[in-house]
């Protein structure tokens, strides 16, 4: 029998969903019980997501209660109407040539589905959770977005039931770079800002993932925003994981995650070819994850790259560590868009935990670069510095890299959960005083 404070966590992404969006709250839920909290997850029963990793379901503690509730999303309707596999406008945006139906889908996503296509889950969820709340006492509610519709569920619960509420932003809202890619009407942009303002005003506490996002949200909300990094889980690393791979050749470089329109690996690929042009067969670059068709075609058009680059596709999270284990260098491609300075992919902390050197393309003054530099874990080059990257690669292949700093405790998921518990303590104590 558990005696912890019950906290309701509302998240769209939950196992068997794969990808980075699910990791943050899966790991927090894993360790919250150590700090006196009993997480209860509320998530869609039939979500429409592309990446699936059933293996992550094994990481959900048996003591964690998961409430699944049906959701209706418009993507299936788009697929049915268009007779195509892609119904998600985010994927349609990557297509070099867009049909009339594609353009209609993007316009509808931009202007009719505010704040996002999961908006149809808000009202049914509030009705369902109202019945749950009558029967169960929750000391706090947590919402995590995107999708930012989750925050509107939290807003509704706060207004009706007065439950202490923490809103977690993994990406910004009104200033999110993804919204800039959509043909959004000015009146719709204003609606996003109005909804965002209500969440900022009503939430008892707010947190986000990077110092840049923290400062930006403090400016918009005119209140304190907590910084709660993503991190790494030491239990994910295999017990036989060494400091360095035990084989010299081929020099193996690994990239994990998504490669799309805003994460362009071409500059690195050009630098790779320059650095290893005289080392045929002695280097291998593995892309582990979803890669845009345009990039795959570009690589396949070059005989040298075609020989040295492998596209492994999406693999379960647990299997990613097999690639880390064989890697001499880990590649990180950050975005070059408006939110780039605050873009800290969750996998970066995992990279750091492996003790492998990290080479990143991005903003050398951004948050990711600062963390890598302070930890001695790697270096960030601008997206256009092909010469600098090629020199770095030449030097790295000829000498053993220095070991990074061991001062990584603040990025341990267990310690980060302690920080989260402190935030929850503050709002639940305030809630008790107000009631």
Image (tube, rainbow, N blue to C red):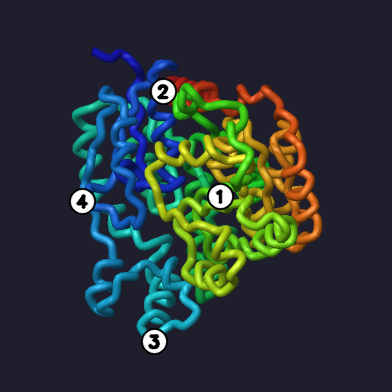
The mark found on residue 32 in the picture is: 2
Of the numbered discs 4 and 2, the one sitting upstream in the chain is 2
Q: Quadrant of residue 280?
A: bottom right
Q: Nearer the viewer, residue 6 or 383?
A: 383
Of the numbered discs 3 and 1, the one sitting upstream in the chain is 3
Under tag 3, what secondary structure?
helix
Q: Name the residue at 63% across, 35% down.
A: 356
Q: Position of residue 414 (x, y in %)?
A: 49, 22
Of the numbered discs 4 and 3, the one sitting upstream in the chain is 4
Disc 4 from disc 3: Cα separation: 31 Å
Q: Mark 4 near mark 2, Cβ–Cβ under 8 Å? A: no
Q: Position of residue 304 (x, y in %)?
A: 61, 66
The mark found on residue 100 in the picture is: 3
The mark found on residue 255 in the picture is: 1
Under tag 2, what secondary structure?
helix
The mark found on residue 70 in the picture is: 4
Q: Name the residue at 59% across, 71% down.
A: 302
Disc 2 from disc 3: Cα separation: 48 Å
Q: Position of residue 152 (x, y in %)?
A: 39, 50
């Amino acid at each position: 029998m558990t005696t912890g404070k019950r906290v309701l966590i509302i998240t769209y992404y939950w196992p068997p969903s794969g990808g980075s969006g699910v990791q943050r709250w899966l790991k927090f839920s894993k360790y919250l019980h150590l700090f006196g909290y009993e997480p209860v997850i509320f998530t869609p029963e039939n979500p429409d997501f592309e990446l699936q990793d059933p293996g992550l379901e094994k990481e959900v503690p048996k003591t964690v209660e998961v409430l699944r509730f049906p959701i209706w999303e418009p993507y299936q309707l788009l697929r049915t109407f268009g007779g195509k596999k892609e119904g998600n406008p985010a994927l349609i945006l990557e297509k070099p040539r867009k049909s009339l139906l594609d353009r209609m889908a993007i316009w509808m996503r931009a202007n009719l589905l505010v704040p996002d296509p999961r908006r149809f889950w808000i009202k049914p969820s509030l009705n369902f959770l109202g019945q749950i709340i009558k029967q169960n006492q929750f000391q706090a509610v947590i919402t995590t977005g995107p999708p930012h519709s989750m925050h509107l569920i939290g807003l509704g619960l706060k207004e009706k039931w007065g439950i202490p509420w923490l809103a977690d932003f993994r990406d910004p809202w009104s200033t999110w770079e993804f919204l800039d890619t959509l043909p959004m009407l000015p009146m719709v942009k204003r609606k996003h800002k109005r909804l965002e303002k209500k969440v900022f005003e009503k939430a008892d506490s707010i947190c986000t993932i990077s110092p840049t996002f923290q400062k930006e949200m403090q400016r918009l909300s005119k209140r304190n925003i907590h910084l709660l990094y993503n991190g790494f889980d030491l239990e994910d690393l295999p017990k036989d994981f060494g400091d360095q791979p035990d084989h010299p050749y081929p020099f193996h470089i690994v990239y994990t995650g998504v490669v799309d329109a805003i994460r362009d690996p071409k500059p690195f690929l050009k630098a790779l070819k320059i650095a290893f042009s005289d080392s045929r067969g002695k280097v291998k670059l593995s892309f582990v994850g979803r890669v845009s068709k345009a990039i795959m075609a570009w690589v396949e058009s070059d005989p040298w790259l075609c020989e040295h680059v492998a596209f492994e596709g999406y693999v379960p999270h647990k299997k990613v560590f097999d690639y880390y284990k064989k890697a001499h260098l880990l590649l990180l491609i950050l975005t070059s868009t408006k939110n780039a300075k605050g873009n800290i992919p969750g996998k970066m902390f995992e990279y750091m935990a492996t003790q492998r050197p990290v080479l990143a393309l991005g903003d050398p003054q951004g948050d990711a670069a600062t963390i890598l530099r302070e930890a001695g874990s790697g270096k960030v080059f601008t997206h256009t510095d092909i010469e600098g990257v090629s020199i770095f690669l030449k030097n790295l292949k000829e000498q053993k890299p220095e070991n990074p700093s061991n001062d990584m405790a603040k990025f341990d998921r267990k310690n980060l959960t302690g920080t989260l518990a402190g935030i929850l303590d503050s709002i639940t104590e305030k809630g008790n005083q107000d009631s």
